[in-house]
Image (tube, helix red, strand yellow):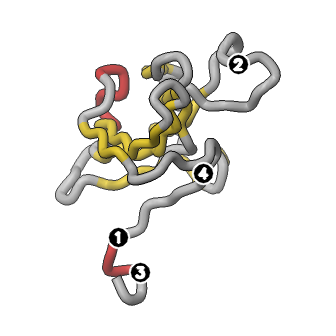
Amino acid sequence: MQHVGRLELEPADVAGAAAARDDAEPGWFLFNGLVKHVTLTGREESYQFEPGVFCSEVGVAPRVGGTEEDDAYLVTLTVDMNRDLSECVVFRASDVGRGPIVRAQLPERIASGTHSCWAPGDSVNGW
């Protein structure tokens, strides 16, 4: 078993991660894209945001009725310094390289590095 962040993964599992290119912002720790790692084969698939757009860590939301390992959605929050706004951005875990399938603008720009996680609504008291 491999330990990735707080996730325990079997060797064949898929891991999604926010990523930073080496040339992104020298001297800053900012994520400017997503990378999907297939740990069994070593294959990677990635998506790069536009310059000046940075994302948070990636939450994984399983697709209702999903049967495949990557039959899920990857959810991240972005900070767009060019347009002074933030969005909730959703990707199909099975096709990260294709880009977002949904973008929802947030009412205010959030701070870079905002943390998030996914939980089914029925597991949250009062939801």
Residue situated in front as seen by the camera: 17 or 78: 78
Question: Gap between marks 4 and 3, in whole Å?
Answer: 20 Å
Q: Nearer the viewer, mark 4 or mark 1?
A: 4
Residue type beneath disc 4: Thr
- For this view, does 98 lie left or right of residue 27? left
Q: What residue is disc 4 on? A: 114
Q: Where is residue 86 in the image (x, y as percent from the top left)?
A: 45, 42
Q: Upstream in the sequence, badge 2 or badge 4? A: 2
Query: Circle 2 is placed at which residue position?
Result: 25
Q: Given contact means CB atoms under 8 Å apart, are the residues at marks 4 and 1 in contact?
A: no
Residue at 37% in and 40% down: 89
Give 88 or 72, whichever is nearer the viewer: 88
Question: Alpha-carbon distance for marks 3 and 2?
Answer: 37 Å
Q: Percent position (x, y) of residue 81?
A: 55, 29
- Label whose residue precedes the other's in the sequence (1 or 2): 2
Residue 26 image point, x, y percent: 77, 16
